[in-house]
Image (cartoon, grey):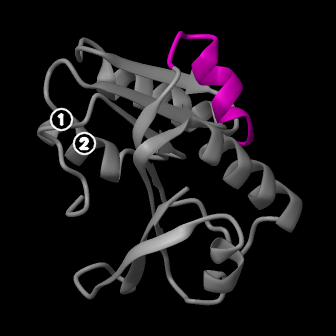
Amino acid sequence: MEPIRFENAECIVEYGPGTGSFTRELLKRKRPDTKLVLIEQNDTFCKLIRRQCAGQPNVTVIHGSAEHADVLLRRRGIKRVDYVVSGLPFTSLPKEVSVRIFLATRRILGKQGRFITFQYTLVKQRFFRKYFHFTDRLFELRNLPPAYVFVLRR
């Protein structure tokens, strides 16, 4: 969460919230008027996240794929995103799926927008560079296992 400037964020998207580890922190830290869009492909996790977020202001849970984030957001009238947060396992996703996610992410990020993703290895770092510019790379030792946090921009 460190790279996110919550005081300025108008719209944050999370890919694959799963059981809600990051989601809970995003909910705690976001301004009440900040839109939070959670895109989850797994139906069971989607239902879980909907229950966890029930009654939260400006939170939308979408059952769908991050590959289509641009279309999913456009349907809801969202044209620009300040931050995309992702824990998707790009090292194990098929290359074509990762490419579609990266292209959709590029289309929704505003000029100052950031794509923040955590990964357990540096294996895909060069692949990320084909689609994004690195603004920072952090290493989180408190995570088990420790993880790299890539902060990227269009």
Could you say where residue 139 lies in the image, as x and y percent from the top left?
32, 86
Q: Residues within 10 Å of mark 1 (few under 14, many from 20)?
A: many
Could you say where residue 56 lies in the image, as x and y percent from the top left?
23, 17
Image height of 154 relative to 20, above or below: below
- Quarter of the image for residue 40 reads top right
Q: What kind of element bears circle 2?
A: helix
- Name which residue lies at 37% across and 45% down: 20
Please tell me which residue lies in front, 88 or 104: 104
**For the magenta stretch, what is the residue range?**
67-78
Which residue bears the numbered disc 1? 30
Q: Amino acid at mark 2?
A: Leu
Q: What kind of element bears circle 1?
A: loop
Which labelled disc corresponds to residue 26?
2
Residue 72 drawn in magenta: yes
Left or right for 130, reference 28 = right
- Quarter of the image for residue 116 reads bottom left
Could you say where residue 127 lies in the image, as x and y percent from the top left?
71, 77
Q: How far apart are the alpha carbons under marks 2 and 1?
A: 6 Å
- Name which residue lies at 76% across and 65% down: 93
Q: Residues within 10 Å of mark 2 (few under 14, many from 20)?
A: some
